[in-house]
Amino acid sequence: MRNLLDHLVAHRIGAFVVLLLAASLEAYGDSSFQTALYRSSGMSRTIAFLAGAAALVAYGLVVNTPRWDFGKLIGVYVVFFFLVAQIIARIRFGQTPTWPVLLGAGLVVTGGLIISFWGS
């Protein structure tokens, strides 16, 4: 797995794919814990906790296995995490982003673009 991830993150597009995967795993794991804590009971609560734990362990492996300068990529990661979290909130919980959230999203995405492409 390390060789594959190292190979992927050696290229900008590959690094973006790995960061998107990591953001998806983290957001899904967080949403599973929210489901377990506030939206389920009994066996479905246990399943949600286990799914959340598995997703967050996978997230940790995906982020920490490759040899990369994560500090340089954190801006892009924040963008991906924010966008994926909004999509999951809409699909899984029926939450529509408010205008302030959408404005904040524009600022987050702008910041990620600056970090990623300024001086590249």
Image (tube, rainbow, N blue to C red):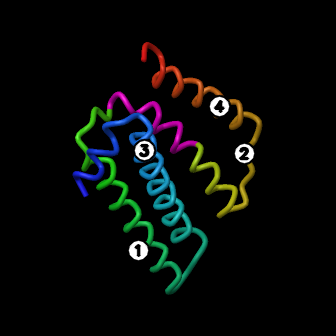
Give the x, y percent position of residue 48.
Answer: 49, 74
Give the x, y percent position of residue 57.
Answer: 33, 61
* Mark 3 crowd level (few <14, some 14–19, many ≥20, 10 Å Cα): many
* Quadrant holding the C terminus: top left
**Label 3 vs 4, first from the N-terminus:** 3
**Pointers 1 and 3 in contact (C-beta within 8 Å):** no
CA–CA distance in space, label 1 to label 4? 32 Å
For disc 4, the marked residue is 104
Give the residues drawn in magenta, as a range: 71-82
Above or below: residue 87 compared with residue 78: below
Which labelled disc corresponds to residue 97?
2
* Residue 16 shown in magenta: no
**How many circles with numbers are drawn on the protein?**
4
**Label 2 vs 4, first from the N-terminus:** 2
Which structural element holds mark 2? loop
Which structural element holds mark 1? helix
Where residue 66 sits, quadrant-wise, is top left
> What's under tag 3, amino acid-wise?
Leu
Which labelled disc corresponds to residue 62?
none
For disc 3, the marked residue is 19
**Pointers 2 and 3 in contact (C-beta within 8 Å):** no
> What's under tag 4, amino acid-wise?
Gly
> What's under tag 2, amino acid-wise?
Pro
For disc 1, the marked residue is 50
CA–CA distance in space, label 1 to label 2? 28 Å
In this image, 118 relative to 104: left or right? left
* Quadrant holding the N terminus: bottom left
Above or below: residue 119 compared with residue 96: above
**Pointers 2 and 4 in contact (C-beta within 8 Å):** no
